[in-house]
Amino acid sequence: MTSETATDKPAFPAAGAAAGLTTAEDWRSILTAFSHIVLVANSDTVDIGSLQAEYPPTALFVFFNKVYKVLDRPFLGHSLLISRGQPRGANIVYRGEVGEVVKFFPREYFLGIMNIRLGLEEKLNPAADFEGAPTGHLDLVGFCGDLYTEAKTPTSGFALALWLSDLKLPGAIVLAGFSAKRSEKWRVVSVHDWSFEQTFLRLFARLGKITIHGGVSANAYSRLAERFSEVPPAEISLAVAEVLSERLGNTDAEVDKLISLTNVIRSTDNFLRRLRPKFLKRKRKSGLGEQKEG
């Protein structure tokens, strides 16, 4: 936890300060001291070295889950790890990856782990599951329920950005790598509404609630209103929606063609996947038999 100085400015939180925290006010007490809170998405666009160089030593860098996908060496800066609860608990716990992840955070810089959940079906893990790493919890069930797309679940980064903004911290909230772009390395999981999140975050940035690292590009569509000043904004919006609808319709038609063309490949793949468990079972039995004979 933090202590107050003679100037009433919160002292810098000690390493491991996340241990045992559970309420928004608990977390606010240690986050208030940082000049910047930089949320680092698991993205190809993130260059950790360049990113860290742009912010002062008083910045806190917040990482998510499997950080070995964006870090290739220990991170020498103030850090916090977000571990999202799943129906089976945190994935780094049930996959036995806690040690592999935490090794990237030297103890002298590491606040600890924030274990969060956003849905009733998600499970928080006891601190003991995180193998001695300082761990706090945050239950955000229902936090985004009044604004998020029905039947979809918010990403951890989106929920945390909104939650941090609600805390009204003195430091700047910075989003780095929140592009929602699919790549060879990263999947864009369909359980989240990426379009909604990107729209919300860009509007949030334009309101000054958060900062997007690298800035928000100018909206070319806003210039249409200037060029066609005699056309009502609603008509411009309808024209844009009409074009997007036609493009999506054309894309769907091409996707249908691709699905048809790959039917044989997918059937073969499914057949091989069904065979694999049987093959492994026979292999295990064969191995046991060899051991007995030996």
Image: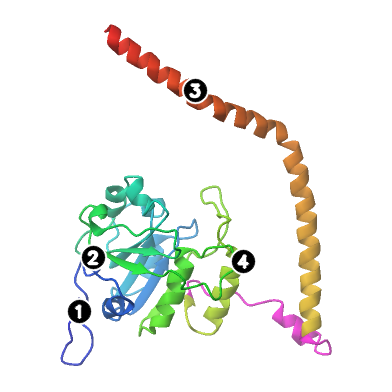
Q: Amino acid at mark 4?
A: Ser
Determine if the magenta segment contains residue 222.
yes
Residue 259, picture quadrant:
top right
169 relative to 269, above or below: below
Q: Where are the magenta residues, as a range? A: 212-233
Taking depth in this image into account, of 211 and 57 the one nearest to the observer is 211
Q: CA distance from mark 2 to mark 3?
A: 48 Å
Which mark sits nearer the N-terminus, 4 or 3? 4
The residue positioned farthest toward the bottom in the image shown: 7
The amino acid beneath tag 3 is: Lys
Pointer 1 with pointer 2, Cβ within 8 A: no
Element assignment for label 1: loop
Q: Residue furthest top?
A: 293
Mark 2 or 3, nearer chain start: 2
* Residue 239 forms part of the magenta stretch: no
User: SS class of the residue under badge 4?
Assistant: helix
**285 and 84: which one is in front?**
285
Q: Is residue 129 above or below residue 77?
A: above
**Which of label 4 and label 3 is nearer to you?**
3
Instruction: Describe residue 187's horizontal placement relative to residue 101 as left or right.
Output: right
> What x and y, as percent, mark residue 170?
35, 85
